[in-house]
Amino acid sequence: MKSDQNKENYKGKNKQLNQRKTKKEHQKQKIDTVFLTAFVYNELIKQERKP
């Protein structure tokens, strides 16, 4: 019985870990999108300021 509990505990911990990894990856993608947007915006501003 303890073996079954250990398996369930492992599955639960593994699921939590995978959820955290997924959340972290989504946060990284959002940050990358913000930086890319800012970069493109700055490039557009530079183009408008050229004589």
Image (spheres, rainbow, N blue to C red):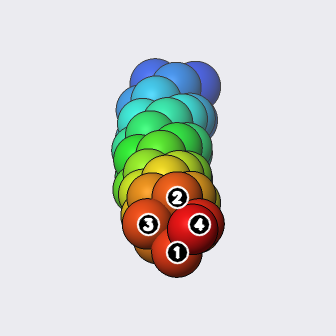
Kindly check if marks 3 and 1 are in contact, taking CB atoms under 8 A apart as contact. yes
Kindly check if marks 4 and 3 are in contact, taking CB atoms under 8 A apart as contact. yes
Query: Secondary structure beneath disc 1?
Result: helix
Look at mark 3 in the image and give the residue it sits on: 48
The quarter holding residue 43 reads: bottom right
- Mark 1 is surrounded, within 10 Å at the Cα level, by few (under 14), some (14 to 19) or many (20 or more) other residues, namely few
Residue beneath the point at 52% across and 75% down? 49
Kindly check if marks 2 and 4 are in contact, taking CB atoms under 8 A apart as contact. yes
* Image x and y of residue 21, in percent: 55, 44
Distance between mark 3 and mark 1 Cα atoms: 4 Å
Q: Label 2 amino acid?
A: Gln
Closer to the camera in the image, 48 or 25: 48
Look at mark 1 in the image and give the residue it sits on: 49
Distance between mark 2 and mark 4 Cα atoms: 5 Å
Distance between mark 4 and mark 3 Cα atoms: 6 Å
Rendered-image quadrant of the C terminus: bottom right
